[in-house]
Image (tube, grey):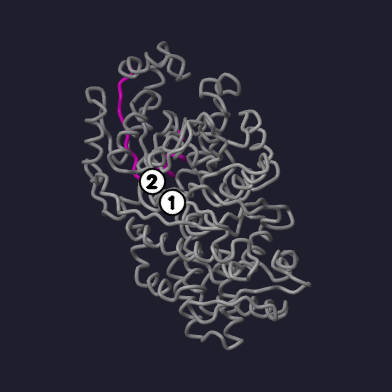
């Protein structure tokens, strides 16, 4: 039965393809992804890449129970993304809890197949499906039939081609075919007499070879456990892929050592290249590896999050964290190119997308009043992730950062330091939460509130402008106060790299659209503003986190 969904809600929903083994979920998923322009991923593929072995070998070495635990973890992670085409392993829907999660997070399409058809299709892939045994396939099929009986859309596939199945799914779900990509732009990052291109647009990852011809020697691709399976096929061969944990756990000495080991095993010399494929943490650690290996090799930034596209992938800052603070070890190492593909932003979870919106807001607050006003005017289109609007927003922020970096590459003149607006409190919140409960953008949002309140107290910002900032953060779903006591973040504030002679160097806004680096705002000023912001958030009824 055909069901109706609004265009906007359907564009943001994941489409899960479930069904018995050899129902064609992967083949249909890949073709559907091409026709709709959505990212595609196969749960079995992710598990194989994380485990470093095939599903059949996982079953043989560790048993089905271990595989099912890995499967549950992968499904839960994918359910947090949006706008995806996801092919599910044949046994996933047999787990009632996972099935309920899937149906609540997206649209479940069940591809129905008879046992004899499944055996016939799987004949060419002998050994790939450990549970597809001709002797018990009928019993397993009958056991799983109840799990496949109530998807949002059910398609009998035995007599259909892949093309026909895709056509029925698109019609049944009212999926729109791939729209024409918005026009992209190319900017130039200039530092120290050198320059590198920054490509911004839609569909860029698939066009890298045409846009930036290079040597036949493929780079080592460094990605995280989700971006690797999602995008590695688009950029370069997966055979030279290094997978990192997601989030700040990637930025450790251990993970850096793992990359060095892979470079050594691959025989990478000074002519080698690293391609960073992921968010800011991937770019930071991969860039630091490139800066350190053989005293510096080339690297390419392919940022897949909004935060990375507008901030961390630009300007050459690289580094890793230590237990005592964020980015304590690092280097300046400029990329040879940056590819900001806004298609990657469509699949981000709401939590990850808003982290980037905090950095975008920072550019408006600290550098460009017109951008701040534009964000207010276009907030609805931004939140609905209209690609042409995303291209414009990423371009605007990129221009601001590149211009600042060109004037002050290594933060020696005070100009680049102004990009740290909100980061003194922000980094402290991240560290105090163990880089788990408080993400970067959320933390910077609170940091901007604190810095702005200090500015109000100094007469550099009006209370109306302060409330305007508060309103935009609220519109973007960002927090405006913290739930961590001052005493818990103070040790991390004192370790901040911007401290000089035991005094913080703070960036405070000068109204909206400009900012200033000051060294006469002491810890007492910071503490008072932090506590007042917490009270302000309580009065307005806004929760943190």
Query: Which stretch appears magenta?
Result: 95-115
Give the quadrant of residue 192: bottom right
**Residue in the picture at 30% in, 18% down:** 117
Residue reaching furthest top? Answer: 135
Disc marking residue 340: 1
Is disc 1 placed on a helix, strand or loop? strand
Q: Is residue 320 above or below residue 530?
A: above
Figure label count: 2
Q: Residue furthest right?
A: 501
**Residue 193, x across and y down, in percent:** 55, 57
Q: In this orientation, which residue lies closer to the viewer: 298 or 372? A: 298
Quadrant of the drawing holding the C terminus? bottom right
Task: Residue 301: give x, y in percent of width and height.
Answer: 51, 47
Q: Position of residue 161 (x, y in %)?
A: 24, 25
Residue 419 rendering spot, x and y as whole percentages: 57, 67
In-front residue for pair 308/264: 264
**Cα distance between the residues tagged 2 and 1:** 7 Å
When the figure is inspected, residue 513 is found, relative to residue 321, above or below; the finding is below
Q: Is residue 103 magenta?
A: yes
Query: What is the crowding at mark 2: few (fewer than 14 residues within 10 Å), some, or many (at least 20)?
Result: many
Given contact means CB atoms under 8 Å apart, are the residues at marks 2 and 1 in contact? yes
Q: Secondary structure at mark 2?
A: loop
The residue wearing badge 2 is 204
**In this view, which residue lies farthest toward the front?**
193
């Amino acid at each position: 039965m055909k069901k109706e969904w609004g265009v906007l809600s359907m564009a943001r929903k994941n489409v899960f393809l479930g069904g018995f083994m050899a129902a064609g979920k992967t083949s249909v998923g890949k073709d559907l992804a091409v026709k709709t322009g959505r990212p595609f991923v196969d749960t079995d593929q992710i598990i194989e890449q994380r485990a470093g072995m095939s599903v059949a070998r996982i079953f043989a070495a560790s048993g089905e129970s271990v595989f099912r635990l890995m499967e549950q973890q992968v499904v839960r992670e994918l359910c947090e993304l949006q706008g995806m085409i996801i092919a599910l392993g044949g046994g996933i829907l047999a787990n009632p809890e996972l099935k309920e999660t899937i149906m609540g997070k997206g649209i479940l399409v069940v591809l129905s197949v008879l046992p004899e058809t499944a055996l016939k299709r799987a004949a060419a892939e002998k050994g790939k499906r450990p549970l597809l045994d001709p002797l018990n396939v009928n019993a397993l099929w009958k056991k799983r039939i109840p799990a496949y009986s109530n998807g949002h859309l059910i398609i009998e596939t035995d007599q259909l081609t892949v093309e026909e199945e895709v056509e029925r799914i698109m019609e049944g779900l009212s999926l729109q075919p791939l729209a024409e990509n918005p026009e992209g732009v190319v900017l130039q990052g200039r530092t120290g007499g050198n320059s590198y291109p920054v490509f911004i647009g839609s569909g860029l990852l698939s066009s890298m070879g045409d846009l930036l011809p290079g040597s036949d020697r493929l780079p080592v691709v460094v990605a995280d456990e989700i971006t690797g399976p999602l995008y590695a096929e688009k950029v370069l061969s997966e055979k030279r892929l290094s997978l990192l944990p997601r989030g700040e756990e990637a930025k450790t000495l251990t993970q850096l050592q793992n990359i060095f080991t892979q470079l050594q095993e691959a025989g990478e010399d000074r002519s080698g290249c690293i391609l960073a494929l992921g968010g800011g943490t991937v770019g930071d650690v991969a860039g630091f590896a490139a800066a350190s290996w053989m005293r510096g090799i080339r690297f390419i930034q392919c940022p897949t999050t909004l935060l990375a596209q507008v901030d961390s992938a630009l300007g050459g800052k690289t580094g890793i964290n230590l237990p005592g603070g964020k980015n304590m070890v690092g280097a300046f190492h400029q990329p040879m190119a940056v590819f900001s593909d806004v298609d990657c932003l469509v699949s981000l979870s709401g939590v990850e997308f808003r982290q980037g919106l905090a950095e975008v807001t920072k550019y408006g607050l600290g550098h460009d009043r017109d951008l701040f006003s534009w964000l207010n005017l276009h907030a609805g289109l931004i939140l609905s992730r209209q690609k042409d609007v995303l291209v414009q927003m990423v371009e605007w922020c990129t221009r601001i950062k590149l211009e600042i970096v060109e004037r002050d590459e290594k933060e020696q003149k005070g100009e680049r330091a102004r990009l740290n607006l909100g980061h003194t409190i922000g980094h402290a919140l991240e560290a105090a939460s163990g880089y788990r409960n408080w993400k970067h953008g959320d933390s910077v949002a609170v940091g901007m509130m604190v810095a702005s309140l200090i500015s109000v107290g100094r007469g550099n910002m009006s209370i109306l402008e302060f409330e305007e900032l508060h309103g935009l953060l609220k519109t973007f779903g960002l927090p405006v106060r913290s739930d961590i006591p001052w005493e818990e973040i103070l040790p991390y504030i004192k370790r901040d790299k911007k401290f000089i002679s035991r005094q913080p160097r703070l960036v405070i806004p000068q109204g909206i659209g400009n900012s200033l680096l000051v060294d006469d705002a002491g810890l007492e000023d910071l503490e008072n503003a932090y506590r007042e912001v917490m009270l302000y958030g309580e009065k307005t009824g806004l929760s943190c986190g």
